[in-house]
Image (cartoon, rainbow, N blue to C red):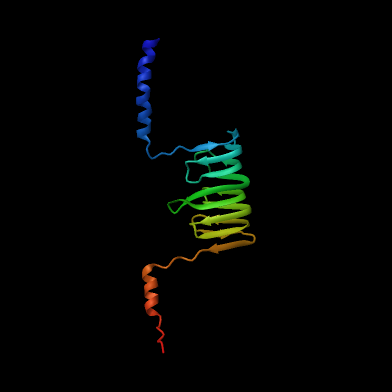
Amino acid sequence: MRAVLWPFLLAMPMMANAAKFTLPSERPIVVLADSVANDPEQNITRLQGHFSIEGSDWPMQADEAVVYGPLENPSRVLIIGKPARIWVKNNGIDRDVMAEADEIEYARGLEVLRLRGNAHLVQGGRRSLAGEYFEYDLKTEKVSQGGPVRISILPAKPAPDESEADMSAKPRQQSQ
């Protein structure tokens, strides 16, 4: 028995190292929750308590989640929490969009976020939206179907050349 196990045990470190080198660009998707229930017939997974998902282009945190489709590539995700949070890679920028609300639905195929209850979204660190309910289209960066919504936009910083040009264009006051 030892003779059979020994070559296998020696080969295990080599197999583990091979896996590391064959998938260097792949990040594992890690899903955490206190409990999980899966309905394979409807392809729905329900996760309860301290839900989080990392390693995707859309990390999330919430009290509970309903995932429609496979965990690694769902068509839609509904998260509920006080608050529920999602960060979405947009325009090639990781975590470009951050949203939090009592309930967030992410329709991945449509690239739409639906926020309900104490909704707040920050896009690109400059644009902020807040309200009770609104939809945000990640492709077009448009807000629609909103209740009362508050929008804040930080002004863009002028380029150094523009500010110098503005200074030279202003008439100078002559002192008397």
Q: Nearer the viewer, residue 69 or 31?
A: 31
Horizontal arrangement in the rendering, residue 82 relative to residue 137 (left or right): right
In the displayed structure, 140 sits above or below 49; it is: below
In this view, the residue farthest toward the front is: 176
- In this rendering, the answer to whether 7 lies above or below 45 is above
Q: Residue at x 60, y 58 (%)?
A: 130
Q: Based on the displayed image, in which of its 4 quarters is residue 67 positioned?
A: top right
Quadrant housing the N terminus = top left
Q: Quadrant of the C terminus?
A: bottom left
How many marks do you count on the picture?
A: 0
Residue 59, horizontal then vertical, whole percent: 51, 44
Q: Position of residue 50 (x, y in %)?
A: 59, 39
Q: Percent position (x, y) of residue 103?
A: 62, 48
Residue 174 falls in image quadrant: bottom left
| Viewer-side residue, 87 vs 174 | 174
Taking the view exactly as shown, the residue that stands out farthest to the top is: 1
Look at 58% across and 55% down and name the residue there.
120
115 or 12, which lies in front?
Answer: 12
Viewer-nearest residue: 39 or 150? 150
Judge from the rendering whether residue 133 lies leftward or rightward of residue 165; answer left or right. Answer: right
